[in-house]
Image (spheres, grey):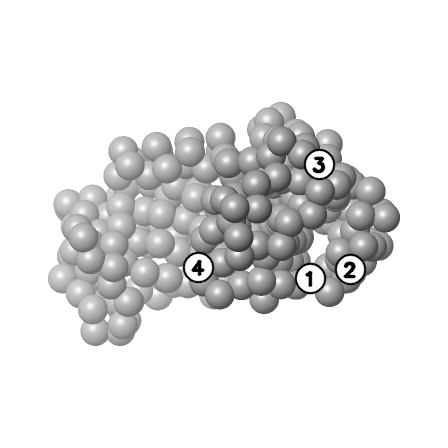
Amino acid sequence: MRVAIAGAGAVGRSIARELIENGHDITLIERNAGHVDVDAIPAAHWRLGDACELSLLESVRAEDFDVVIAATGDDKANVVLSLLAKTEFGVSRVVARVNDPRNEWLFDDAWGVDVAVSTPRMLASLVEEAVAVGDLVHIMEFRKGEANLLEITLPDDTPWGGKPVRKLDLPRDAALVTILRGNRVIIPESDEPLEGGDELLLVASPDVESELRALLLPTGRQNG
């Protein structure tokens, strides 16, 4: 997969290293010459320039990339790049970093963003996930909020203790992705029994979240 990353700061470089390790072809675009360090990530293609300029995007043939990641520290630049990548070059997948949560409302399909990643919001979700038992925690949203990655930790008195996964009659627009139990990551096969303390990761439409609470939580602990 060919991926262009705008912004070669700490975030952009970390993404690049991870994707290169997974075998992807990475181009790093950085407008600050002081941040261009080819030796730091020699496997990447480096380009000095402003990713918000059409001429730069044309020179790297942005239309040939499978994914464009706007990872700069400037929300305005990330939004502009997302719009150009989607509307001018038809990039199928555009991922944008949100630096200031107050700007999240801008990062939608109207500006060419397929996935917006807000580090402050994600950190807050992870804090909630670490301490919350007995309620749904939003980890990440997909498709502009049409589906969410959710986590719920089953309380010790869960009515599902000992029952197999196949007994879960999940709503139509919800799917159990995995079960975290201690240090184990468990594929939710039909015969796998559930236990109190299990962390369930689900992908679901917002419309069915109340149904999930009613299904998975004991009466009186549904905080929806």
Residue 62 sits in quarter: bottom right
Q: Which residue is mark 1?
A: 65
Pointer 4: residues within 10 angstroms few (<14), some, or many (20+)?
few
Of pointers 4 and 1, the one earlier in the residue sequence = 4
Under circle 1, the secondary element is: loop
Of pointers 1 and 3, the one earlier in the residue sequence = 3
Contact flag, marks 2 and 1 (Cβ < 8 Å): yes
Q: Which residue is mark 4?
A: 21
Q: CA distance from mark 4 to mark 3?
A: 25 Å
Question: Which disc, if any, is residue 61?
Answer: 2
Q: CA distance from mark 2 to mark 3?
A: 17 Å
Identity of the residue drawn at 34% across and 32% down: 127
Q: Residue furthest bottom?
A: 190
Of pointers 4 and 3, the one earlier in the residue sequence = 4
Q: Position of residue 81 (x, y in %)?
A: 74, 43
Check disc 1 and give the amino acid type. Phe
Under circle 4, the secondary element is: helix
Identity of the residue drawn at 18% across and 53% down: 183
